[in-house]
Amino acid sequence: MAARVSLQSDWVSQRYVELDHESCSGILFEMADNTENLVLEHLRAIRADVGALRDDLREIKSRLTNVEIGISSLKRDAADQYAEVAGQHARYDRLQERIERLEKRLELVPP
């Protein structure tokens, strides 16, 4: 009797699997289509986000290039000013030497 019950229960469970498969096959295909559509929607959203990030990155690179150009311009201006200051120091030193020679010649400073 146990063997008969197990055979009957196997047949019943197999029958339910067949029924479930037949009744759910349309639902499974529909769910697969929905899942596929959902994945495609997410991929499209990701692609749009990546495109927006790419545009933002392009703008940031452009602005960074402008900042670098500005910094190099400032460095060039600072170097020019430094050269100008160094030239002024050299002129000041020459004038100082001339004044000292004049003072010695005119005996304006004590020996």
Image (cartoon, rainbow, N blue to C red):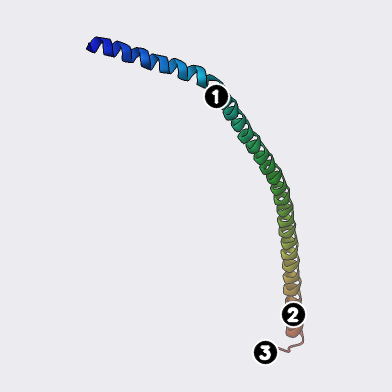
Indicate the amino acid at tag 1: Ile
Quadrant containing the N terminus is top left
Classify 42 as above or below 12: below
Measured in 3D between alpha carbons, the distance from the residue under mark 1 to the one under mark 3, in whole angstroms, is 115 Å
Q: CA distance from mark 3 to mark 2?
A: 13 Å
Contact (CB < 8 A) between labels 3 and 2?
no
Give the camera-side residue of 103 and 58.
58
Residue indicated by mark 2: 101
Q: Which element carries disc 2, helix, strand or loop?
A: helix
Residue 69 placement, left or right of 33: right
Which residue lies at the image location 23% right of the left edge and 13% below the top edge? 2
Number of marks? 3
Q: Which residue is mark 3?
A: 110
What is the quadrant of the C terminus in the image?
A: bottom right
Q: Residue furthest front?
A: 1
- Mark 2 or mark 1, which is nearer the start of the sequence? 1
> Residue 110: horizontal and vertical position, in percent?
67, 89
For marks 1 and 3, give the one nearer the viewer. 1
**Which structural element holds mark 1?**
helix
Query: x%, y% of residue 59?
Result: 72, 47
Q: Position of residue 70 (x, y in %)?
A: 74, 56
x and y percent of residue 93 in the render? 72, 73
